[in-house]
Amino acid sequence: MTIQSLLSALVDIPAPSGHEHSLRSFVQSMIQPHADYLGVDALGNLIARKGEKSKSGRRIMLAAHLDQIGLIVSHIDEQGFVRFTTLGGVPVHRFVGMRVRFLNGHCGVIALEREVETKERAPKVEKFFIDVGAEDRKNVPVRIGDVAVFDSGFREVGRRILAPALDDRIGVALLIDHLCNAPTGPNEVYYVFTVQEEVGTRGAGPAAFGIDPEIGLAVDVTLAGDTPHAGVRNRVRLGGGPAIKVKDAGMISDPAVVDWMTRIAEEARIPHQFELLEGGTTDARAIQVAGPGVHSGALSIPTRYLHTPSEMIDMHDVEQAQRFLGLLCQSNFQA
Ligand code: CO
Ligand code: ZN
């Protein structure tokens, strides 16, 4: 299976934060035959292990999050409109007219109270509702606590991919691909498919506590700054290769990890970029401060239009990230 077809299958399985079960089962069935150990912890993190630690080797924890941003029903109003709040960072005011799909299969459209539509630039989430086509309250096919995700699919546009939740299905795809296809090296590698990253990196910390890794690496996306008037100084671009995280809003990568990643990329002539993200963070933040602390960093895939129904990545970056991850797991880390 190519990484692209794997990605397209992963994008089609909804997994808003706290509701990762369907996606977890799918990933589990794919990796089962290739893992030396496989387990699911109390939070729902899927943890697999492969390879044995040689004398010079390390215990490496790779993390990619299963969950995606979503919406959760808070109440149904008198007229049968579904009121909601957000799971993770969803700038709802940008998504009027977008369709959403609930886990039970029912669909609806995000709408805004007409009175506030013209007056306020970024109305609060209470002013929005989902119209699920119900004539009245009795016929609403969803309940309080039901969750939904953007109802937009996987599309190829030239060398690039458009899809919802590439954050972080691309990381999940890279981990599955590595676990199933890459040869083992001197390191013992833990592949952790984490839960609840989008609501505050809640799954990765407990997983790291249990694994006690010597090196932690999140494989996730980072915001590209290569669109018109993007307003950022650190311009990670699509097609420029995977990014080595130096810093984001939640962590400062371990300089020894940054140096190690840079050396491996340079030696193999892997095009790469350095990332300094001003807002947001990844599971690496939680891993870094788990237990007595872990040497941590992150490998990032440049992505445009993050947290929208149509995130965009470049397959060239994905192929280079695939190579990069393979080489990192084959190599020796020295702090
Ligand atoms: Co995200
Ligand atoms: Zn992410």
Image (spheres, rainbow, N blue to C red):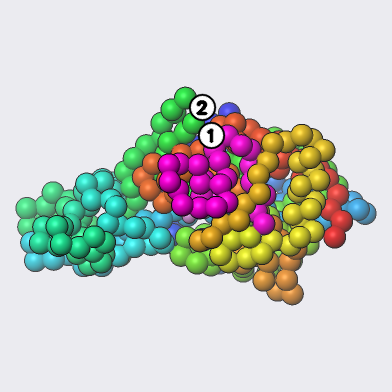
Residue interval drawn in magenta: 222-246
**Neighbour class for label 1 at 10 Å: few (<14), some, many (≥20)?**
many
Name the residue at 57% across, 51% down.
Answer: 234
Question: Which image quadrant is residue 156 in?
Answer: top left
Residue at 38 percent across and 48 percent down: it is 308
Compared to residue 49, the image places residue 266 above or below, namely: above
> Can residue 273 be seen by looking at this rendering?
yes
Residue 223 is inside the magenta segment: yes
What element does badge 2 sit on? loop
Depth check, front residue: 33 or 264 = 264
Expressed as whole percent of the image width and height from the top left, the position of residue 173 reads: 57, 41
Which of the labelled discs sits on residue 159, or is there none? Answer: 2
Looking at numbered disc 2 in the image, what kind of residue is underneath it? Arg
Residue lying furthest right: 55
Residue nearest the observer in this picture, 22 or 215: 215
Q: Compare marks 1 and 2 and give the one earlier in the sequence.
A: 2
Is 297 situated left or right of 112 in this image? right
Q: In the rendering, at what x and y percent does residue 89 appear?
A: 40, 60
1 and 2 marks in contact (CB < 8 Å): yes
User: Which quadrant of the figure contains the N terminus?
Assistant: top right
- Give the residue number, with chain letter if any, for mark 1: 314
Q: Is residue 77 above or below residue 29?
A: below
Q: Amino acid at mark 1?
A: Asp
Q: Is residue 47 left or right of residue 188?
A: left
In-image side of 33 versus 17 (left or right): right
| Residue 276 pos. (x, y %) | 60, 56
Q: Nearer the viewer, residue 76 or 114?
A: 114
Q: Where's residue 136, x and y in %?
A: 7, 57
Residue furthest bottom in the image: 292
Q: Quadrant of the C terminus?
A: bottom right
User: How far, Cα to Cα, is label 1 from label 2?
Assistant: 6 Å
* Secondary element type, mark 1: strand
